[in-house]
Amino acid sequence: MNDAMIRETVELAHLDVQTLAAGYRASKVIGSSVVNAADETIGKIDDLLVSPDGKQPFAVLSIGGFLGIGARLVVIPYDTLRFEEKTAVLPSGTRDGLKMLPEFKYATASSVTGENAPNSPPQPMVVA
C-alpha cells in the first residue's frame, strides 16, 4: 500500500485552551460529593465512563451505604450534572430517585460476549 491509499482525513476543532484549562480534570471530579438543589448530599462520583462509541460521557455514582459499606453504583449522563463552585450538583436528584436506577456493575472478561474480545478492556454493563 502506498501513502495515498492509507491517508485519512481528521477534523480538528479549534478550542480556547485558556478556557479549557480552567475546567475540571477527571482526577479531580472522581471522588466529589454530589448534592441536589436542596444542598443534600445524594451520592459520590465513583468513576467517569465514555460510551463504547466514544461520544457520550457518563458519571458512575456511589449511592447509599455508610463509608462505602452497603453502597451501590448507578450511572447518570454526565451532562445532567452541573458544577457550581467546585461542587457537583444534580439539580433534580434525590436519594430515592437514584435508588430506583438499575445497579451498575463493570463488565468482566467472563461476562463479555459477541464483538468484545476477552482481552479487551472492561466495558460498562447495567444490571436490571
Image (cartoon, helix red, strand yellow):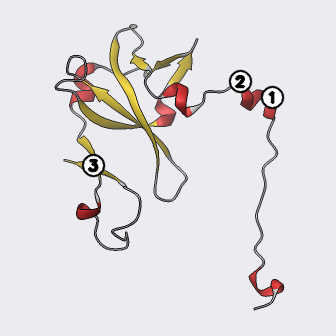
Q: Which structural element holds mark 3?
A: strand
In the visual, does 23 lie left or right of 109? right
Question: Which badge, 1 or 3, comes first in the chain's sequence?
Answer: 1
Q: Quadrant of residue 26?
A: top right
Front-lying residue, 70 or 41: 70
- In the rendered image, which residue does mark 1 sit on? 18
- In the rendered image, which residue does mark 2 sit on? 22
Q: Nearer the observer, disc 2 or disc 3?
A: 2
- Residue 116, placed above or below residue 5: above
Q: Position of residue 122 (x, y in %)?
A: 37, 55
- In the rendered image, which residue does mark 3 sit on? 126
Residue at image x 47%, y 31%? 80
In the visual, does 101 lie left or right of 53? left
Q: Which structural element holds mark 1?
A: helix
Which amino acid does the dot numbered 1 rest on? Gln
Crowding at dot 1, Cα within 10 Å, few <14 / some 14-19 / many 20+, comes out as few
Q: Are marks 2 and 1 in contact (CB under 8 Å)?
A: yes
Question: Which badge, 2 or 3, comes first in the chain's sequence?
Answer: 2
Q: Position of residue 47 (x, y in %)?
A: 42, 36
Q: Nearer the observer, disc 1 or disc 3?
A: 1
Residue at image x 77%, y 60%? 11
- Residue 127, placed above or below residue 11: above
Residue at image x 46%, y 58%? 52
Q: Estimate the spatial distance between the alpha carbons at disc 2 and disc 1, rounded to whole Å.
A: 7 Å
Q: Position of residue 106 (x, y in %)?
A: 30, 48
Crowding at dot 2, Cα within 10 Å, few <14 / some 14-19 / many 20+, comes out as few
Q: Which structural element holds mark 2?
A: loop
Q: Estimate the spatial distance between the alpha carbons at disc 2 and disc 3, rounded to whole Å.
A: 33 Å
Which amino acid does the dot numbered 2 rest on? Ala
Q: Estimate the spatial distance between the alpha carbons at disc 1 and disc 3, rounded to whole Å.
A: 37 Å
